[in-house]
Amino acid sequence: DAKTTQPNSMESNEEEPVHLPCNHSTISGTDYIHWYRQLPSQGPEYVIHGLTSNVNNRMASLAIAEDRKSSTLILHRATLRDAAVYYCILSSLNDYKLSFGAGTTVTVRA
Amino acid sequence: GAVVSQHPSRVICKSGTSVKIECRSLDFQATTMFWYRQFPKQSLMLMATSNEGSKATYEQGVEKDKFLINHASLTLSTLTVTSAHPEDSSFYICSAAAWGDNFNIQYFGAGTRLSVL
């Protein structure tokens, strides 16, 4: 079961970028890197995923290290609505279930 | 993103009663749905994987006779908590999987907060 390591918490100011690191040194070649976030009292929300190349979508960017042993989720301009727990999860066809760790709790200061 | 509707959002029941939670994928067909449980201040724990037209696969330690799962159609899965007791009080969350090449993305419902008195 490939695992990820994330910092417990991170603080940011509104309108500033947030860089959330994730280490996954035991990642296998078939593992995709997924990010989900969970706002208070809600179900998780898909953010982004990638395999080898960096990815961008309307919510965030995902920067993947060349050796794939780490990645960074980038929120370009944090808003108060981005305050949530962010989960970095590895998933593949061989192990398609999502295993949620403790995640990183992001606090955004106005 | 895809929309998953979960109902009810909150339920309060007496000990010994059964509670049914519905999970619907509104704009796509989900052959696979998942049920999670989340206790306060903790992360999500997968309870079971539900495949349309077949029996659910339960995670270790989850009682299949206690948590009945039915996935009768491509857009609906239900979780029934039978003979609920106070220790079953939790936040129950479903998700529906959308499959791509070699990966799946899960779209989650808003969750059901169950309080058993």
Image (cartoon, coloured by chain):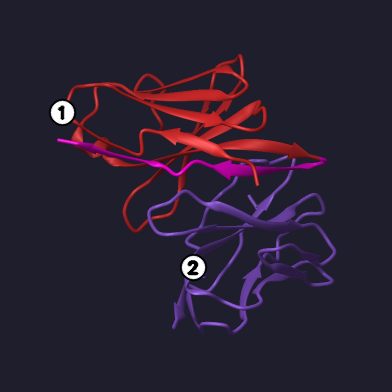
Chain colours: A purple, B red
Residue at numbered disc 1: B14
Q: Which amino acid, by three-letter code, is at mark 2?
A: Arg
Gap in angstroms between the C-alphas marked 2 and 1: 36 Å
In the shown orientation, is residue A4 left or right of residue A52? left
Q: Nearer the viewer, residue A108 or B115?
A: A108
- Residue A30: horizontal and vertical position, in percent? 80, 49
> Which residues are drawn in magenta?
B101-117
Give neighbour class at mark 1: few <14, some 14-19, many 20+ (Cα, 10 Å). Answer: some
Residue at mark 2: chain: A
Query: Which one is closest to the eye, mark 2 or mark 1?
Result: 2
- Give the residue at x 44% y 83%: A110
Question: Given the image, on which type of amino acid does mark 1 rest?
Answer: Lys
Q: In the rendered image of this protein, does residue A92 appear above or below residue B67?
A: below
Horizontal and vertical percent position of residue B32? 63, 29
Horizontal side of A106 relative to B97 (left or right) equals: left
**Residue B63 percent across, percent down from the top left:** 38, 26
Kindly identify the residue that appears in the image at 31 percent across and 54 percent down. Answer: B40
Q: Is residue B114 magenta?
A: yes
Question: For the point 59% across and 24% down, which residue is it?
Answer: B75
A69 within the magenta span: no
Q: Residues within 10 Å of mark 2 (few under 14, many from 20)?
A: few
Q: Is residue A59 above or below residue B33?
A: below
Magenta span main SS: strand
Using the image, tell me which numbered label, if any, was put on residue B36: none
Which quadrant of the figure has residue B21? Answer: top left
Which residue is at the front of the view, B20 or A104? Answer: B20
Q: How many marks?
A: 2
Reading the image, the residue beneath label 2 is A81
Q: Identify the residue at image location x=57%, y=83%.
A: A15
Instruction: Report x, y in % for residue B117.
Output: 14, 35
